[in-house]
Image: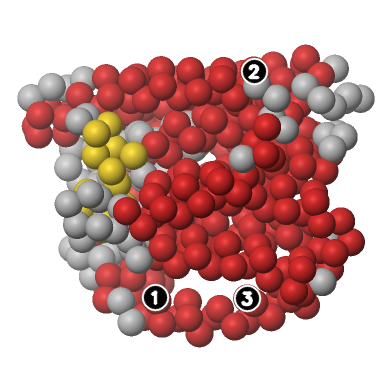
């Protein structure tokens, strides 16, 4: 039943968001009190983001998603312009050497999130229009690669390698499923490896992250500190956790406890069972998302749903992998759970579009 799939997808999202509300308060209240003299500082802001995201989610659930096809190219152009503007001193907000945000009073907007959604819509529209021409290098592969190159190039200038890789992975996955010759994709990946090597090992903090990933104990008070504290949090939780609100790692040991490393606090407070529950919820979300993809009758909806599910799955897998020490540190929040502002809002928009697309399919 179509209705059951929509309810399942939406319900899992709501459960993850509710868990996020609880864990954001638990992991940030002491830090918020120390810095802002308000233990509810991050929770109140997150609830505002949730209201904004909720309104946008219901908006995208109610419109005809085919209208996104009509605005795919203008939306991509607007996104590229915003990515340019955020790099301009005085317009874009700089934090810790990165210029990734526009600041509007108490709300920050990250244009790379809009760009990610825009390029997914653009590529879905492109594949649905091209048909068999997608197998052509000049007519099927080159145009989306130019769009991807512009978008990725501007994001890497912020600098934000994590988001750049995420965008690249999702677009290439969409093109592969869309019928682009695997040789083209493989050639692009091989040509990109030297560039990726230079981007990582020619930049000191990225090189330090890779070395810390390989052996965090080489620099336990520096580049390896975050990974070690994350693993300590996960390990100290045991099977059932130390109890909600009783984390020790959030007491200024684990940086970004309410954002990029919230999964580690879940592991410490709720234990192995809590982390498994989160992973199972994401697996259910992805499974239901795949059912939406498989049963969507039109090509645009098919590739749009595939791109959105792939993006959320990639972000979740990377965040959990980083927290567990399986992957090098990347600045990707855990969808629906992490405190993330514009990232959280755009994840909610993705759910609204997926539920919208699910209306058009018939499920067994």
Name the residue at the right extreme. 364
Q: Is residue 211 above or below residue 32?
A: below
Q: In the picture, residue 179 is in which quadrant?
A: bottom right
- Label 2: how many residues lie within 10 Å, few (<14), some (14-19) or many (20+)? few
**First of labels 3, 2 by sequence position:** 2
Q: How is the image coloured?
A: secondary structure
Residue 137 rendering spot, x and y as whole percentages: 77, 74
For label 3, count other residues whose C-alpha is less than 10 Å away and answer few (under 14), some (14-19) or many (20+): some
**Tag nearer the camera, 1 or 2:** 2
Q: Nearer the viewer, residue 124 or 71?
A: 71
N-terminal label among 1 and 2: 2
SS for dot 2: helix
Please state the horizontal and vertical placement of residue 124, each as a whole percent of the image. 71, 48
Question: Which one is nearer the viewer's eye here, 34 or 84?
Answer: 84
What residue did someone put label 3 on? 189
Callout 1–callout 2 Cβ contact below 8 Å: no
Label 3 secondary element: helix
The vertical placement of 55 against 306, above or below, is: above
**Distance from the alpha carbon under mark 1 to that under mark 3:** 16 Å
Asked whether, in this view, residue 141 is left or right of residue 17, the answer is right
Pointer 1: what residue?
200
Q: Is residue 268 at all visible to an observer of this figure? A: no
Question: How many labels were placed on the picture?
Answer: 3
Label number found at residue 20: none
Between 204 and 179, the one lying in front of the other is 179
Count neighbours of disc 1 (C-alpha within 10 A) and say few if under 14, some if 14 to 19, many if 20 or more.
Answer: some
Frontmost of labels 1 and 3 is 3
Q: The C terminus lies in which quarter of the figure?
A: top right
Measured in 3D between alpha carbons, the distance from the residue under mark 3 to the one under mark 2, in whole angstroms, is: 39 Å
Residue in the image at 81% along x and 19% along y? 2
């Amino acid at each position: 039943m179509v209705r059951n799939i929509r309810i399942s997808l939406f319900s899992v999202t709501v459960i993850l968001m509710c868990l996020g509300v609880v864990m954001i308060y638990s992991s940030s209240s002491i830090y918020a009190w120390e810095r802002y003299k308000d233990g509810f500082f991050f929770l109140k802001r997150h609830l505002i983001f949730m209201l904004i995201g909720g309104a946008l989610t219901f908006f995208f659930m109610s419109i005809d998603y085919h209208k996104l096809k009509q605005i795919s190219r203008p939306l991509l152009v607007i996104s590229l312009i915003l990515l340019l503007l955020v790099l301009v001193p005085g317009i874009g907000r700089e934090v810790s050497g990165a210029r990734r945000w526009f600041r509007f009073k108490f709300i920050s907007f990250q244009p790379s999130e809009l760009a990610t959604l825009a390029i997914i819509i653009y590529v879905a529209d492109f594949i649905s229009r091209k048909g068999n021409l997608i197998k052509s290098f000049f007519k099927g592969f080159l145009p989306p690669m130019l769009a991807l190159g512009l978008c990725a190039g501007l994001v890497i200038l912020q600098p934000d390698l994590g988001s750049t890789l995420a965008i690249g992975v999702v677009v290439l996955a969409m093109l592969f499923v869309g019928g682009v010759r695997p040789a083209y994709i493989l050639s692009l990946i091989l040509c990109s490896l030297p560039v990726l090597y230079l981007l990582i090992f020619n930049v000191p903090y990225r090189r330090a992250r890779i070395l810390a990933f390989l052996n965090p104990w080489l620099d336990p008070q520096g580049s390896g500190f975050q990974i070690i504290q994350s693993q300590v949090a996960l390990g100290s939780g045991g099977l059932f956790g130390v109890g909600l609100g009783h984390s020790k790692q959030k007491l200024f040991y684990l940086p970004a406890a309410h954002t990029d490393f919230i999964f580690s606090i879940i592991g410490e407070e709720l234990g192995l069972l809590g982390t498994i529950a989160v992973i199972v919820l994401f697996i259910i979300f992805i499974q239901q998302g795949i059912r939406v993809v498989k049963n969507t009758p039109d090509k645009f909806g098919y590739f749009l749903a595939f791109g959105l599910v792939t993006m959320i799955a990639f972000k979740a897998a990377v965040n959990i992998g980083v927290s567990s020490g399986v992957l090098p540190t990347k600045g990707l929040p855990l969808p629906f759970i992490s405190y993330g502002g514009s990232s959280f809002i755009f994840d909610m928009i993705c759910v609204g579009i997926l539920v919208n697309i699910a209306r058009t399919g018939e499920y067994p």
